[in-house]
Amino acid sequence: MKRVQNISKILLVEGEDDKRVIPELIEKAGEISWEAGNTTIVGIRVLGSKSDLLKEGEILTALKGSGLQALGVLIDADEDANACWQSIRHQLEPTYPDLPTDLPSTGVIAQAPEQPKFGVWVMPDNTSCGMLETFLLHLRPTSPLLELSLEVLKTAKAKGAPFKEVHTDKAQIHTWLAWQNPPGRQMHNAIQEKMLTERSQLLTNFLGWFYELYDLTPLSPVAVPRV
C-alpha cells in the first residue's frame, strides 16, 4: 500500500536524492519507522533546486499550509553555509523575530505565536562548505579506501575529468560506493544496507534536530543541547 505524505509536518528539500536519503537515514540510523499507520511521519517536498528553495516567498508560502505544525528546510551550503542561512533569515525574521544571527552547529529550530514550528539545517554541518554527499562521507566506516578515492579523483581531474571542484564530494562518495560489494549502490540503498550509518557527533546533531523539530521519539533517544 502506498503511504500518504504527511501534510502537518513538512520538510522542504532541493532534490530527489534528499527525498530518497532522509527516510532511510531516519529509519536505519535514527531507529524510527518512517511510516505511521498509512502515512509518513514527515512529508518531503522537493523544490527542484537550491535557487527554487531560496526564491523569495517560497518558504513563507509553505508556512501557510493548512494544518501545518512544523516546517523544516534542508539545504546544501555548497560554498557558503552562512550565505544560505542569511538568505533564509532575511525572509523569515519578520515572522520569527528570535532567529539567531549566526547559524548554530546543531541547526535552527524556532517558534513564534500562532506559527508552525520552523527549522533549518544547512548541509553538511551548518558551518562548513559542502552538501548532502559531504554529510554522508562522514557516515562511512573508517577505511583507507576513502583516502584512495580522493587520490583517484585528483588524478582524474588532472587528466581532464570535467566535474566541478564544488562537486568533489559528490564524485568521491560515488567513487567509494563503486568499490563496495555490490558496487555502485545508490546513496539511499547504501544507507538501507547500513554502509553509511557510522555514528558520529554530526549524525547525532542532525538526528537531534530532526527529532525535536518534528516531535519524534526514537528507540534510542539522543540528547543534543540546543544553542
Image (cartoon, helix red, strand yellow):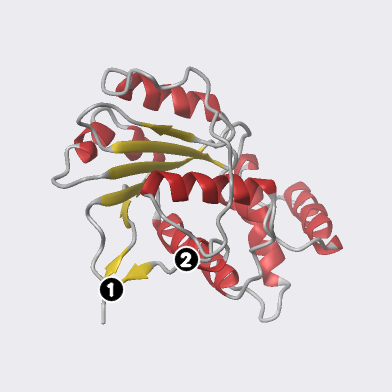
Q: Amino acid at mark 2?
A: Ile
- Compared across the picture, whether 97 is left or right of 216 comes to left
Residue placed at 43% from the left, 69% from the top?
33
Q: Residue at x 17, y 43 (%)?
A: 65
Q: Is residue 48 visible?
A: no
Question: From what the image shows, is residue 136 above or below residue 78?
Answer: below
**Residue 126: x %, y % from top left:** 56, 34
The residue type indicated by label 1 comes to: Gly
Question: At which x and y percent is residue 16?
Answer: 40, 58
Residue 221, numbered circle: none
Whether residue 17 is visible here, answered yes or no, is yes
| Residue drawn at x 45%, y 41% as measured from the top left | 75
Name above or below for residue 71 compared with residue 207: above
Left or right relative to 139: residue 215: left
Q: Where on the picture, by quarter, is residue 164? A: top right
Q: Residues within 10 Å of mark 2 (few under 14, many from 20)?
A: many
Tell me which corner region of the image, top left, top right, bottom left or bottom right, holds residue 88.
top left
User: Tag 1, which secondary structure?
Assistant: loop
- The front one of 118 and 88 is 118
Q: Read off the residue under disc 2.
A: 32
The residue at which mark 1 appears reads as 37
Question: Horizontal and vertical percent for residue 103?
Answer: 52, 26
